[in-house]
Amino acid sequence: MRTLTQKRVQRHATAQKLPASLKRLPGMVKIPKMPKCIVGQCFTDKSVFAYRDSDLDNLLPTTLKESGETKVSGYELTKVTTEADLAKVGGKFTNLLQIEDLILRTEKGENTGLITNGYANIFFLGVGNSVFAVDAYRDSGGWYIYCDRFRARDAWSAGRGFFSPAT
């Protein structure tokens, strides 16, 4: 069992690792255990999703493994932030259903922290030894979902949201 001093040291160490361009959002969102994901069946409800990037199918395997219950932390980008800096924070999602769950709950009115003003919400998806950036943004037409390979030098502008499983 850790002492109070050890907990404070750990909390301080975690705070130091957060890039200066990120502001942690209050609270965490719990995502339940998710079954194996068939990629081609994710983000397909046309009443919610206005656009689904074909790179989800082109870059990702046909199925993704099931995921356990996950607590998710959210962050606001306060200035331009590279994907390399984002990768220093938290863990990676392992199943697209985790991301879809957050979006569907947001649509039902739950405060998940996702941004709904047309700016991107960024999620890193870990598949084997590869990492992908999945971004989702909402405008008046619905949610738009994109997928691309992780690129350390790629940068995202201020005002975007970044979400990662808590570690």
Image: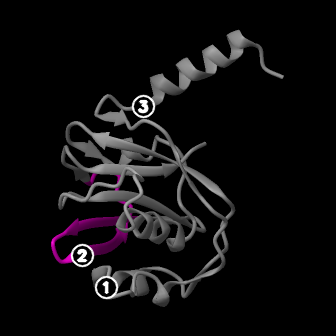
Tell me if label 2 and label 1 are in contact, CB under 8 Å.
yes
Q: Residues within 10 Å of mark 2 (few under 14, many from 20)?
A: some
Q: Residues within 10 Å of mark 1 (few under 14, many from 20)?
A: few
* Label drawn at residue 60: none
Residue 148 appears at what percent x and percent y?
34, 70
Q: CA distance from mark 2 to mark 1?
A: 8 Å
Q: Is residue 117 above or below residue 40?
A: above
Q: Quadrant of the N terminus?
A: top right
List the residue tagged with mark 3: 18
| Element type where label 1 sits in the image | loop
* Quadrant assignment, res 115: bottom left
Count the marks: 3
Q: Which residues are magenta?
A: 133-154
- Tell whether 68 sits left or right of 147: right
List the residue tagged with mark 2: 142
Q: Quadrant of the C terminus?
A: top right
The amino acid sitting under disc 1 is: Ser
Task: Please identify the residue farthest to the front as the structure is shown.
Answer: 109
Seen from the viewer's position, the closer of residues 71 and 47 is 47
